Image (cartoon, rainbow, N blue to C red):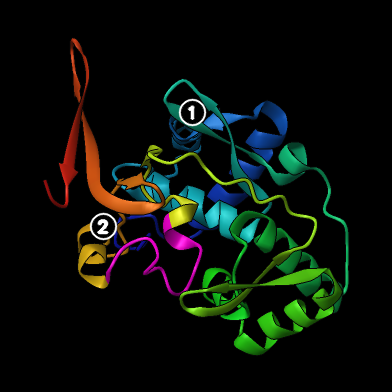
Amino acid sequence: RLRELGVTGDQPARAVRAIERMLARDGPLTRAEIAERLRKLRIRTEGQAIAHLVWLAAAERSVCFGPDRGRDRCLVLVRDWIGKPEPMDRERALAELAVRYLRAHGPAAPADLAFWSGLRAADAARGWAAIADRLTEVEVAGGTTWTLRSRRRDEAPAGLARLLPSFDEYLLGWKDRRFIAEPTRWRTINPGGGWYHPAVVADGRAVGTWATERRRTGDRLEVRPFSR
């Protein structure tokens, strides 16, 4: 894609190294600030090029999203944002990932962890088995799931509605998401091309989508319910 956008030769490699250096020296920086600095190095950033260069830096080096500055998201070095990672062997890493996943998504099953993380099913099962003594079974409509014994399960009050943003973790975190919406409704939330529309959720169920339109007088909120 970078070649299609005219970022050729050694430009991508130079850009990645430059992004890492500028974040170490001046970070956090917005994408526009990074693009300005790259242009001074005669690296092409027009159009979508800067988005793909930043993505490449995150994929190949220690770069990640950091704090927001107004409406703009900044990039930082991983070590500056979350500290130096603690080395661990694969078995311990699988167990730790299973614990962290369940803290945010329980009750769930190993198949959900595999779906969410991209791990092979066997690796997800290994991580699950490693923390078996910390799990409690929970029966749901789809079968048996598990949650951490130490996790408090406070029920949300009835009638609670939320406006979830695009790609919210609640929309992405399980393999079987029929408890959120039926397949016919998912086609409205996730029409294809990897895109998820912001969703209106009431009592845990998706009941529509929403969008905002920026105007001089302020943002206009448009809610598109699935039914009356």
- Residue 102 image label: none
Instruction: Say what amino acid the circle numbered 2 marks.
Output: Ile
Q: Position of residue 224 (x, y in %)?
A: 16, 43
Residue at horizontal 39%, vertical 47%?
Answer: 203
Q: Which residue is mark 1?
A: 33
Nearer the observer: mark 2 or 1; the answer is: 2
Is residue 11 visible in the rendered image? The answer is no
Looking at the rendering, the stretch of residues picked out in magenta corresponds to: 171-182
Residue at horizontal 48%, vertical 28%?
Answer: 33
Q: CA distance from mark 2 to mark 1?
A: 33 Å
How many neighbours does mark 1 have within 10 angstroms: few (below 14), some (14-19), or many (20 or more)? few
Q: Position of residue 9 (x, y in %)?
A: 45, 61
Q: Secondary structure at mark 1?
A: helix
Instruction: Say what amino acid the circle numbered 1 marks.
Output: Glu
Along the line of sight, which residue is nearer the eye, 9 or 26? Answer: 26
Quick check: 7 above or below 129?
above
Q: Position of residue 91 (x, y in %)?
A: 84, 78
Q: Quadrant of the N terminus?
A: bottom left
185 is within the stretch colored magenta: no
Residue at horizontal 20%, vertical 69%?
Answer: 184
Along the line of sight, which residue is nearer the eye, 20 or 103? Answer: 103
Q: Quadrant of residue 77?
A: top right
Residue at horizontal 61%, vertical 85%?
Answer: 120
